[in-house]
Amino acid sequence: MHAPNTAGDQTGSPVAPAPAPPEKVVIVLSAGLGPGQAANAAACIAAGLGAGQPGWAAQPLRDAEGLHSSAISHLPIIILSASDAQMAALCDRLPMESPAGGGLALFPAYAQGIHDCHAYWERHRESAHRGLPMLGIGLAGARRWVNGLTGSLPMLR
């Protein structure tokens, strides 16, 4: 079996190119999180953003010994910090739908206590998130869009 390529498959049919990865990826975390909570929230948000952005991460890899793994993000992921007030203001400015090619992932405070994905998805569908405490917000997309929402927030220290 031959590996696929971007020029076409075995029959000469063109192979659709992968969508372009986002220009910028930012995760904003609540300043009050401890190191373990911040790492967990960032990992969950990055997984959600990556799953919604084909071509950004998870390229199947094999090393020289044959060990199979998935590629990490080939884009830097900037981690910013926000006070509760800044997080609420950011949440209020979020568009109802991300722009074309953009992605948004929320980590509401209630998610910490839910350990079943179906229960989380149901709670998410039933909640209006703009007024709820957020532990993290992830944005992936055009640099101008991401910067417009997060430009004044400091790096997580």
Image: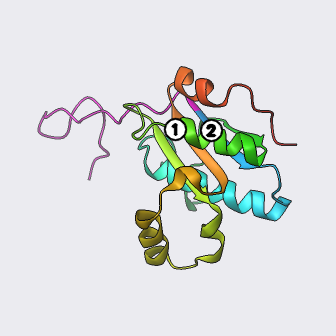
| Residue 68: x %, y % from top left | 54, 61
Q: How far apart are marks 1 and 2 (CA)?
A: 6 Å
What type is the residue that disc 1 sits on?
Answer: Leu
Could you say which quadrant of the image residue 138 lies in? top right
Task: Answer left or right for 78 relative to 71.
Answer: right
Could you say which quadrant of the image residue 115 lies in? bottom right
| Residue 120, visible in the rendered structure | yes
| Residue under pointer 1 | 94
Give yes or no for residue 4 being in the magenta stretch.
yes
Give yes or no for residue 5 being in the magenta stretch.
yes
Give neighbour class at mark 1: few <14, some 14-19, many 20+ (Cα, 10 Å): some
What type is the residue that disc 2 sits on?
Answer: Leu
Give neighbour class at mark 2: few <14, some 14-19, many 20+ (Cα, 10 Å): some
Q: Which residue is drawn at 59% across and 24% down?
A: 148
Depth check: 80 or 64 in front?
80
Q: Residue at x 62, y 38 (%)?
A: 90
Task: Answer left or right for 69 relative to 95.
Answer: right
| Residue under pointer 2 | 90
| Residue 157: x %, y % from top left | 88, 43
Task: Answer left or right for 34 relative to 51.
Answer: right
| Magenta residues (range) | 1-24
* Callout 1 touching callout 2 (CB < 8 Å): yes
Where is 1 relative to 74, above or below? below
